[in-house]
Every structure is written in structure tokens, then in C-alpha cells.
Image (cartoon, rainbow, N blue to C red):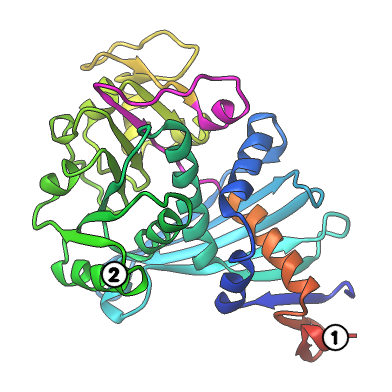
Amino acid sequence: MRPDEILIIDRDTVERCLAKQDPVALVESMLHHHAAGGTVLPAEGYLAWRNGVGAYTRAIAMLGGSDTSSGRTYGMKLINASVSNPGLGIERAGGFTVLFDPETARPTALVEAGFISAERTAAYTMSTLRVLGPAGFDEVSIVGCGTIARAHVRLLHRYFGAVRRIHVHDIDPERARRFASDVTGRFPEYTVDIHPDVHSCVSASQVLVTLTVSDEPYIEAGSLRPGTFVAHVSLDDLRPEVFEHAQAVYVDDLGLVCDNPRRILGALIRDGRVAVPGTSDAPGSGPGRAITGAYGDVLRGALPAVRPDDGFVVSNPFGMAVADVVMGRAVADLARAEGLGVMVDLLGAATRAGGAA
């Protein structure tokens, strides 16, 4: 590649390339490097506004770098979203990841970010389920039936062959029906039960995955069955007592969670109701239990893995853009090797990657 050439990779190509990868292994490798200090994760850029219909709308720019099997990788994920987008028939979030040459810092690839973002999010859940989830399960409850929910079902089918029943709830009943139809159409062996209320969905199985955009906690500890693993992927679904009374609480990055009081766990830390590892319990209105630790430390054997028995275990990832960068690098490497994508000379014309000079 010449210094001003950039490979543009669309969603179809991303899907094609990731089908040949192991997304869980990619995310776990990044988490190993992150726990060992092999990543760089600067503060994100965040811009929010209300669009023409008054809907919450935002742009997030997240830079990251990580050691990988292909060498040091640097990049930036730009992911923008509006909660009114589904009403327009488009996904809530979309954007791209830019990869950088580690020597010249020039952009080398522009990769569609929506699919990768959903895939790495679901891959993180699959990893935590494998290590922290119930010893055996064949049912999963999902709250929120959007794009990321589809990614979770896709990877559940790939990594957990015993799963046969999915319980779902969405505040939009029609979205839940479309989701159920899509799932059974793609995976006929699945049964999808649509729950009219969230609490029956939550209590229907011992694996709960929350994938909403709620900014108001609503899931109570009493709704969870004994022995439940909760993948709290979205922002504010769990009420404070769930964190305060969990057997264990794992995060992907302590600093990110502590520094963001917009999310429920960060607010609980700020208020002294949950403490970070290595600190004394701060005073507050709750028991002030400590977060168990970072999940990457579990993967590298520095922290024990706690599975739920008569209580519940919570995984609360903040979401690290460095995972998108690592996954984008794997996609770009394979796309180049197979002549996929469109090569654009920023100083001139566009050509197919396979025919580029």
C-alpha cells in the first residue's frame, strides 16, 4: 500500500471475514493484553444533542491501541446513534473504525463499525458465560430486541449448542415479534417465548442478558432466580440492590466504570454504595460491597472465577473500543489477503482491492 491508500470494508465484507474468525478468542486475547498492561485506552470524545424530533442523539470517538498476534495495532472507533433511528427503519447506531499504520500514523483501513461493535459485545458476553455462567443451561432471557440482541443469539448458537429456548421482552411488542420471527427463521431449532412483562422474562431462566437503552433502573434482585448469571450489557437496567447483594461483580475496566457516573454502577461507586477492589467500603445507604475485579484478570488466572450458586453473579462491561480496533485489524488483514474491499487513494481514484497496484 502507498501512504495515502486506505482500504474501505463494508458490512457484507466484515461479516464474511468475521465468519472465518473466532470473535470470542479475539476479545479474550485483547482482555489478556489489557490486564497485562498491553493496551492504550485514552479518554473518549463524547458529543450529545437532541435531534429535530427531540430524541437523544450522540457521537462517540474512541481511540485505542493493543498488542496483537499481528503486531501493535492502533485505531479509532466512531460510533454515532439516535434513539429515534429504529422508527426510521435503521439501526440505532452506526459508524466506522479507522486503523492506523503504527509507523506513519496514516489511516490504512476504514471498517464498518456497526457489525463489529455488536459482534465484540456479544463475544464478551459469550466469554463471560463460559467462565462465570451456570455450569449448564439451555435457556436464555434477553431484554431488548435490537441489533445487539441478534448478535447475541447468533453467537449463542455458535458457542452454546445446548441452548434451545430464548425468552425475550421489549417495550415495543412489534419489535419483539419481528425479533422472534427472525430468530426462528434463521435457527428453526430455537423456541422463542415473547414475554409481555419484563419481570416474567427476567425470571424465566438462569441467564439474563440486558440489551436496552434504559436510563432508569428497573430490574430488582427479587426477580432473579437463584443461580442466575446477569450480563448487564446496557446502561441502567439493574437496580442498586442487585449490585449490592450479588455474589460477585466483574467489569472489563475498573477505571472506565469508576469514571462514568452516567451509568448505574459508576453512580453507585461515586455514592459509596459499591467500592472498588483494594479500597475500604465507603459509607453509604447500602452495604458498600466491593466489585470483585476485572474480567481480564480472571482470564489470566490472577482472579478467581465465581459462578452463581444460590445467589447471582453480575458481569458489567463498560465496553472498550480497543476490542473494536483489534477485531477490525483481524478483518482488515483477512480482507487484504483475500482481495476484498475497496482500495481508495486519498489523492486520486478508487480501485478494487484485488486489482490495486
Could you tell me residue 80's position as x and y percent?
46, 65
Residue 178 colored in magenta in the image: no
Which residue is depicted at the point 21% across and 27% down? 226
**Which quadrant would residue 222 be assigned to in this image?**
top left
Q: Secondary structure at mark 2?
A: helix
Viewer-proximal residue, 183 or 264?
183
Amino acid found under the numbered disc labelled 1 = Ala
Is any atom of residue 84 visible in this view? no
Q: Which residues are magenta?
A: 294-320
Residue 356's disc number: 1
In the rendered image, residue 241, in percent from the top left (x then y), is placed at 21, 26
Q: Residues within 10 Å of mark 1 (few under 14, many from 20)?
A: some
- Whether residue 316 is in magenta: the answer is yes
Give the residue furthest to the left. Answer: 196
Label 1: which secondary element: loop
* Image position, residue 331 (x, y; %): 67, 65
Side of 201 where 350 appears, left or right:
right
**Badge 2: few (under 14), some or many (20 or more) residues near its Cα, within 10 Å?**
some
Q: Which mark is residue 327?
A: none
Identify the residue under disc 2: 184
Q: Mark 2 belongs to which amino acid?
A: Thr
Residue 306, position as x, y percentages in the image: 42, 22
What residue lies at 26% left-to-right and 28% top-to-bottom?
227
